[in-house]
């Protein structure tokens, strides 16, 4: 419905959870699998919707971090492979992005969530893909923004050396700095 509202109802759309584990290939690829009607097109191009729950899903040993993830065992690996990995181009939209807030990137050493780590891994595995972070929920603490690596606020050649330095600068700036 939302795509129709903006005149884009003809774009191919598929839900990750409706596609079997494995490489997502078009009919010209080596797999005969297809997302089917209402899914990705014959070249496996289109919009792939993945809930955070689906994105963190894995099978067998991968679920317990004892094996190397592959498209056959990990939804994250499946999406990274579909996007093209380090050579990928396109856009990844993180809707309700605040759900990735616990990345373990906080100075106080609190643990990270599987969702936060998966969002970071997706961005790091596809460095040339543009990322859009969308959320109507404001962050109450700077540490909740650790997943937003693509904002360009920290890292090589950026205003802050790393996330911890950015975090300290924002904390010193008080509430006004959180309007970031």
Image (cartoon, grey):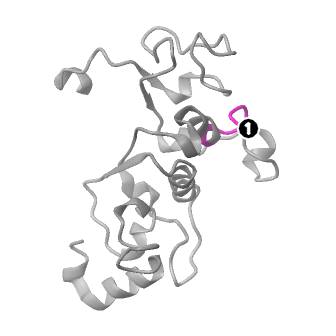
Horizontal side of residue 140 vs 41, given as left or right = left
For the residue carrying disc 1, how many other residues have a C-alpha within 10 Å: few (<14), some (14-19), or many (20+)?
A: some
Secondary structure at badge 1 equals: loop
What residue do we see at 47% from left, 26% from top? 15
* Bounds of the magenta segment: 70-76
Provide residue 41's location: percent of width, then percent of height. Answer: 46, 14
Compared to residue 156, the image places residue 122 above or below, namely above
Q: Position of residue 134 (x, y in %)?
A: 30, 50
Name the quadrant of the C terminus.
bottom left
Expressed as whole percent of the image width and height from the top left, the position of residue 54 reads 55, 38
For image coordinates 41% across by 38% down, the residue present is 90
151 vs 126: above or below:
below
The foreground one among 124 and 34 is: 124
Task: Classify the position of the N terminus by image quarter.
Answer: top left
In the rendered image, the vertical position of residue 2 relative to residue 41, given as above or below: below
Number of callouts: 1
Q: Residue furthest bottom?
A: 172
Position of residue 20 relative to residue 97, above or below, is above
Q: Residue at x 72, y 38 (%)?
A: 70
| Res. 161 image quadrant | bottom left
Quarter of the view holding residue 147:
bottom left
Q: Residue at x 57, y 54 (%)?
A: 121
Most common secondary structure along the magenta stretch: loop
Residue matched to label 1: 59
Q: Is residue 34 shown left or right of residue 67?
A: left
Q: What x and y, as percent, mark residue 66?
A: 82, 52
Decide whether residue 160 is among the magenta residues.
no
């Amino acid at each position: 419905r939302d795509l129709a509202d903006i005149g884009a109802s003809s774009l191919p759309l598929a839900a990750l959870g409706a596609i079997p584990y494995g490489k997502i290939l078009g009919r010209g690829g080596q797999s005969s699998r297809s997302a089917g009607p209402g899914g990705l097109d014959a070249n496996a191009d289109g919009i792939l919707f993945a809930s955070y729950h689906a994105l963190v899903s894995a099978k067998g040993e991968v679920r317990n971090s004892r094996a190397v993830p592959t498209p056959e065992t990990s939804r994250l690996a499946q999406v990274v492979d579909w996007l093209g990995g380090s050579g990928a181009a396109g856009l990844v939209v993180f809707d309700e992005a605040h759900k990735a807030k616990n990345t373990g990137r906080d100075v106080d050493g609190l643990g990270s969530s599987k969702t936060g780590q998966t969002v970071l891994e997706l961005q790091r595995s596809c460095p040339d893909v543009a990322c859009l972070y969308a959320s109507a929920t404001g962050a109450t603490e700077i540490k909740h923004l650790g997943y937003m690596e693509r904002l360009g606020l920290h890292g090589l050649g950026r205003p802050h050396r790393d996330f911890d330095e950015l975090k300290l600068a924002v904390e010193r700036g008080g509430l006004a700095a959180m309007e970031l």
